[in-house]
Amino acid sequence: MRSRPLTGEWGGRRVTRDRGGPGDPAATPGGTVAANPRNGRPYRRLCALVKAQRQPCWICGHDIDPGLDARHPMSWTLDHAVPLSRGGSLLDPANARSAHRRCNSARGNRLTIRQPRASRRW
Ligand SMILES: [Zn+2]
């Protein structure tokens, strides 16, 4: 059956086969970001960049110990000055902030940033 061992494959045809698929499953044709961009390499790079700056928590103002375990409530997390839900850029360093995990999640639960629909109950 296989009378020609290698010569057939090196004829140059098998290359075209690789170009048929969508390639990167994380990228959608419209250019919009896929389901979970936080898994992406650019996001991790941004995390490393911001963390290396050793900035204090932008919410409470205290220092963050970079050596803490990621599950520790006072460990370092990447937060965003403008939430993604409000059009903030996930990967923009100017929008990235250092925050304690605890502060970050606390802010996520109740919005400290003014709410557009809030009635005057300040
Ligand atoms: Zn904090």
Image (spheres, helix red, strand yellow):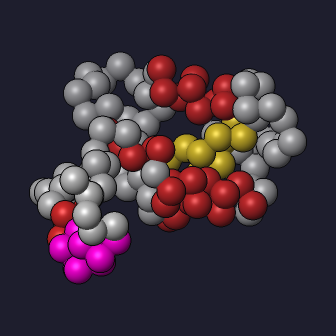
Residue 77, how many percent across, how many down? 65, 40
Task: Note whether 2 is above or below 11 in the view shown.
Answer: above
From the viewer's perspective, tell me whether residue 50 is left or right of residue 3: right
Q: Position of residue 13 (x, y in %)?
A: 18, 73
Left or right: 105, with 48 as reference point: left
Residue at position x 27%, y 68% in the image: 4
**Region in magenta:** 6-14
Decide which of 40, 19 is in the foreground and name it.
19
Name the residue at 24% across, 72% down: 8
- The residue at 67%/26% (across/down) is 102
Image point (72%, 25%), residue name: 71
**Where's the C terminus, which quadrant?**
top left
Q: Name the one closer to the observer, 94 or 19.
A: 19
Judge whether 82 appears above or below 112 on screen. Answer: below
Q: Is residue 35 above or below residue 46?
A: above
Q: Is residue 12 magenta?
A: yes
Place of residue 81 in the rendered image (x, y in percent of width and height, measured from the top left): 48, 49
Q: Is residue 83 left or right of residue 56?
A: left
Task: Residue 99 in the image: state x and y as whole percent.
Answer: 66, 41
Report the front residue among 47 and 20. 20
